[in-house]
Amino acid sequence: MAGLVVAVSFPLLWRGGQADRAVIRVDGRVFAEYPLDAPRRIDVPGPLGTTVVEIQPGRARVHSDPGPRQYCVRQGWLARSGAVAICAPNHVSLMLTGRQSGYDSLNY
């Protein structure tokens, strides 16, 4: 019974911090950083082609990517600090940052 209570309450009580910036990397190096305060689209060049990152107030996502499996596109909208979408075949990643990370040592 106690395990059921913990399992049900965990998603309701655990919250990552709200993100305020998007960090885009290519080959592990920072390509660009943008605040999550205004809509914009960013074309990010990679070895397979262009990855398109979309930003809306408070959230960001990989809109399109030339990679074959589209895992980073399927991640959908990211809104929590520490959330990451990795487009491995194109060497592009999107990470959200904020004052408080959504992850801590308990998650490892």
Image: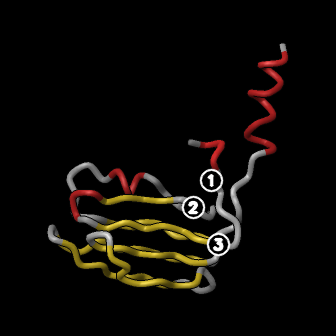
Point out the tag, 3 or 1, that comes first from the N-terminus.
Answer: 3
On the rendered structure, is 20 left or right of 95?
A: right
Q: Residue 82 got which mark?
A: 2
Q: Give the x, y percent position of residue 76.
A: 48, 57
Q: Give the x, y percent position of residue 69.
A: 26, 49
- Asked if the residues shown at circle 2 and circle 1 are in contact, with their CB atoms under 8 angstroms apart, the answer is yes
Residue at the disc numbered 1: 103
- Crowding near pointer 3: few (<14 within 10 Å), some, many (20+)? some
Q: Secondary structure at mark 3?
A: loop
Residue at the (38%, 82%) spot, across then down: 42
- Crowding near pointer 2: few (<14 within 10 Å), some, many (20+)? many
Point out the tag, 2 or 1, that comes first from the N-terminus.
Answer: 2
Residue at the (15%, 67%) spot, across then down: 48
Give the CA distance from mark 3 to mark 2.
8 Å
Residue at the disc numbered 3: 98
Question: Is residue 18 or residue 77 the one in the foreground?
Answer: 18
Give the CA distance from mark 2 to mark 1.
6 Å
- Asked if the residues shown at circle 3 and circle 2 are in contact, with their CB atoms under 8 angstroms apart, the answer is yes
In the image, what residue type sits under mark 1? Tyr
Q: Residue 14 got which mark?
A: none
Residue reaching furthest to the top? 1
In the image, what residue type sits under mark 3? Gly
Q: Secondary structure at mark 1?
A: loop
Question: Is residue 104 or residue 61 the one in the foreground?
Answer: 104
On the rendered structure, is 9 left or right of 84?
A: right
Q: Tell me if residue 96 comes above or below residue 88 in the rendering.
A: below
On the rendered structure, is 16 left or right of 49?
A: right
